[in-house]
Each structure stands twice: as C-alpha cells, then as structure tokens.
Amino acid sequence: MPAATKNIYKKLIKLSFSAMLILCLTACSFSGLLGAKSEVEKLSKTDFVLDTAATVTLYGCGDEQLLERCFELCRQYELIFSRTDERSELYELNAAGSMAVSDELLELITLSRDYAELSGGAFDFTLGGVSVLYGFSSDSPRAPSGGELAAVMEHVGWEKVRIDGNVVTLSDPGAVLDLGAIAKGWIADRVAELLLENGVDSAIINLGGNVLCLGSRPDGENFVVGLQYPFKDMSQTIADIRVSDMSVVTSGVYQRCFEQDGVFYHHILDPGTGLPCGNGLLAVSVVSPRSADCDALSTACFVLGLDDGLELVDSLDGVYAVFVTEDYKLHYSDGFQDALF
Ligand code: ADP
Ligand code: MG
C-alpha cells in the first residue's frame, strides 16, 4: 500500500462516525437550496440507535410525537435484529440453533437468503463469528490469527440456514447470523411506512448514513444527497445526486476500520477468506426505491468488486450504483448519470 494511502487510513481511523456524514450533507444541501425564501418548517431529531447516530427530518408535516415514534420503532427492531444484544431475538436464534421466529425476523432472513443467492454468496449473513473475532463494534478491534480465523470460517456459509415455515434452523450450530449489512435498510423502509401512514410526504430518514428520502422537497424539487468523499471530513462530497422517493446507501471501507502492524482492516468481509475485501474499492453507493435493497446490494457489490458488481446492478431494474476505486475514480452503472444528476 502506498505511504500516502496509509496516512489517509491512519487519519481515517480517528473518524469513527463518518457513516453519518451523508445525512448531514443531505440536510445542509437541502436548507442551502431552499434558502431564506422558504417558510417550510423543518422538524428534526438525532439519537443513537442501531449502534449508530440516526436522524429523522420531517419537512412541513408531522410532529415531535411522530418523530419520537420513529425512534421507538428503530429500538423495537433493534431488539429483534441485533447480533450483540443478549435480549434480541436474533441472539436467541444464534444460541438455540433452531426456533420459530417472528414474522419480521423471518422476512429479513428470507430477504438475506435471496440476496446471498442473487450475489452468488458475496452477501453472506453467516459471517457473524468472523465479525466477533475482529470486534469491529468494540472499543478494541484486532486482527485475528490465521488459526482463529480458520476455526471460525468453518461455520460460515449462507447455505447452512434452512427456512421451513417460520422455523429457522442453522444446520451448523456453530454458524452465527449477522444481519448488519441489511437491517438498517429494512428498518428505514419501515420508518418510511410509519411516516406515510401518518400523512408525511416529505422527509429524510438517515440511519447512520443509510439514507431514505421520502417524497421530494416541499418545493417539489429533488432532495440533494451528498456522497461522502472517502476518508475526508463531512463537508466534502465526491458526488451530489438528486433523488425523490429513493434510498441511497453506501458501503465504504472507512465506515468501521482499524490499523494493526501497518495493515488496514475494514468491516466488509470476503466470505471466502474471512479477510476484509481488498479488491481496489473504497466505497459503493446504491440508489433504488427500497432501502433494504440498497443496503444489501451495496455490501454485495462491494464484495463482488467493480466488474461483477456493475454487472449485477445493470441486471436489475430501477437500481443504480456508483463505485469508488482506490484512485478515487467514480464508475457509474448504466443510466446513473441521466437519472441522478
Ligand atoms: P454498515 O454496517 O456500515 O452500514 P454494510 O451495510 O456494508 O455497512 O454492512 C457491513 C456489516 O455487515 C459488517 O459490519 C458485518 O457485520 C456484515 N458483513 C461484513 N461482510 C459481509 C458480507 N460479505 N455479507 C454480509 N454481511 C457482511
Ligand atoms: Mg449493506
């Protein structure tokens, strides 16, 4: 790795909350564009939930109570999908190896399996044991030894998960499910539904950089979402895109990472080796109406790499992606520039 890149990585490690940048940029861009002319009221709340900083902003509709209900909903789903919270339903499933699960958990596991299949296993929701080894969510992440990694990798493989009615079974009791690459997107979709049911037609839901723009700006224009410039501070974007009723989700090496013995480690893992994907990518942003799709696809495309990732996105209707390579060049899927600039 070139020395300059290494230095950038070092700086990056200090910026652990980079995932929330997209939202800030969204909000800033929005108020900037509306300017002093607009009288539209903006109601916004930020809280720490789903292991990240989340912000919901309502434009010209809704009230504080509704805003609070959005966060309650996130906490409710966190108690189902969290891999680390001992009170969660997923934690119980991982411990039990087989059980009847709630409709919500069944839906997210089924969708995860569909994305594992669609991506040829690049998206693998059984990497939980490997994430535990690295401790990306902990205060002291570390690189595991080759032996530790090999022992845990034996229990990785999405085909070890069987779904029969609402009973989910891990055919390998050592497998650990981790829905971290899709849950925030799925939850953002549920928050959007709650807002729609309550008459909100203009809002931005940002769950730690997992952004969903509901409707358009109150003045009818598209929202502007800034894509973070990898490793730079939140005021710098690598591209600004224009969207209405669309979600924008980024998987980036800079979102959770650390350095050990001069080696850079990040949280997007190669299901074949258990090592952080080192395929020349810094980030992949996916844009589509459903946030769950964006979340799953951003991770899947990152793992697939530039060529196969672009091919997957181009095969799907209404889905766009931009890949950022290590030379900071942008690579767009078909139609991206026409639809989103
Ligand atoms: P973020 O969690 O920052 O939103 P992603 O959506 O890309 O980023 O999800 C990365 C998380 O998903 C990791 O922290 C890990 O828990 C899990 N994960 C890592 N590699 C994979 C993979 N290949 N397939 C599915 N999940 C993964
Ligand atoms: Mg994801």
Image: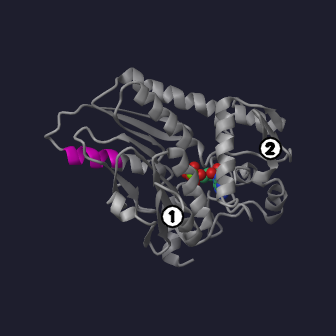
Find residue 214 and name its label.
Answer: none
Give amino acid for label 2.
Arg
Q: Which residue is mark 1?
A: 314
Please state which of residues 130 and 312 is positioned toward the viewer in this rendering: 312
Residue 306 showing in the rendered view: yes
Is 299 positioned to the left or the right of 64 in the image? right
Q: Which residue is mark 2?
A: 162
Q: Which residues are magenta?
A: 26-34
Compared to 74, does 242 lie above or below? below
| Label 1 environment density (alpha carbons within 10 Å; few <14, some 14–19, many ≥20) | some
Outermost residue to the top: 65
Q: Give the CA distance from mark 1 to mark 2.
A: 30 Å
The mark nearer the N terminus, 1 or 2, is 2
| Label 2 environment density (alpha carbons within 10 Å; few <14, some 14–19, many ≥20) | some
| Mark 1 lies within 8 Å of ligand 2 (Cβ measured) | no
Q: Mark 2 falls on what kind of element? A: strand
Q: Which residue is drawn at the image coordinates 80% and 44% (left, top)?
A: 162
- Quadrant that contains the N terminus: bottom right
